[in-house]
Image: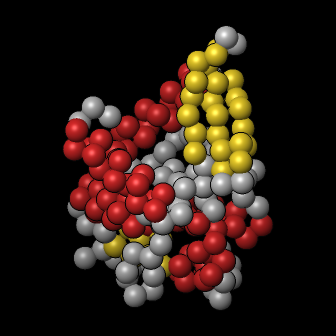
Amino acid sequence: MTDPVLATLRRRLVASAADEGLLDVAYRTVDSPVGRLLLATTPAGLVRVAFEAPARLDDVARQLDDYFAGRRRTFDVTLDRQLSAGFRRTVLEHLAADVAYGTTASYAALAGLAGNPRAVRAVGSACATNPIPLVVPCHRVVRSDGTSGAYRGGPEAKRLLLTLEAGQAGQAGQVGQASP
């Protein structure tokens, strides 16, 4: 990210997410005598030290770059869903499959798609614990009154993502409704 405006925005988003307690995993890479290592921590402590294989991420990094540049509306990567189970996994599968770029769905609508229309709070929990945000677009889930609702990356990040998609799609709509 070389653009100073984007760098400033990123710093603000990270600071806002940290201030609101939304950061679940912090990570950094370090060079070591055995190669580059990825270190990750959660609020509970160090969770992972991993040997890096960055070339394995080239495709998804390229797709994310294309998404942010407005050249990609869907992702074509294999997802490992082992960090989500049960109803949460079902919600995230429907979210990825049924809530298209440039559209939004209410928590209630997504609960219905997942087969339990009354499980609105469980949908919120599934979105809050989504281990693959952006690719599985939990930012597209909004409250029934149309307000944005919460987002793990913070409200500013959610607004930015919805604005990006609405601008690229030409018009955003609700799932189950035609876009105006």
Camera-side residue: 42 or 160?
Answer: 42
- Residue at x 32%, y 34% (from the top left corner): 1
- Please state if 106 lies on the left or on the right of 13 as rendered: right
Query: In terms of image quadrants, where is residue 36?
Result: top right
Q: Is residue 178 visible?
A: yes
Residue at 48% from the left image edge and 52% from the top image edge: 134
* Point 73% across, 70% down: residue: 87
Closer-to-camera residue (64/156): 156
Tell me residue 154's x, y (percent): 43, 63
**Where's residue 6, x and y in %?**
27, 44
Residue 62, image x, y percentages: 43, 32
Q: In which quadrant is the C terminus drawn?
A: bottom left
Q: Tell me which corner region of the image, top left, top right, bottom left or bottom right, holds residue 145.
A: bottom left
- Residue 112: x percent and y percent? 60, 81
Residue 12's place in the image compared with 142, above or below, is above
Q: Quadrant of residue 16?
A: bottom left
Q: Residue at x 30, y 74 (%)?
A: 179
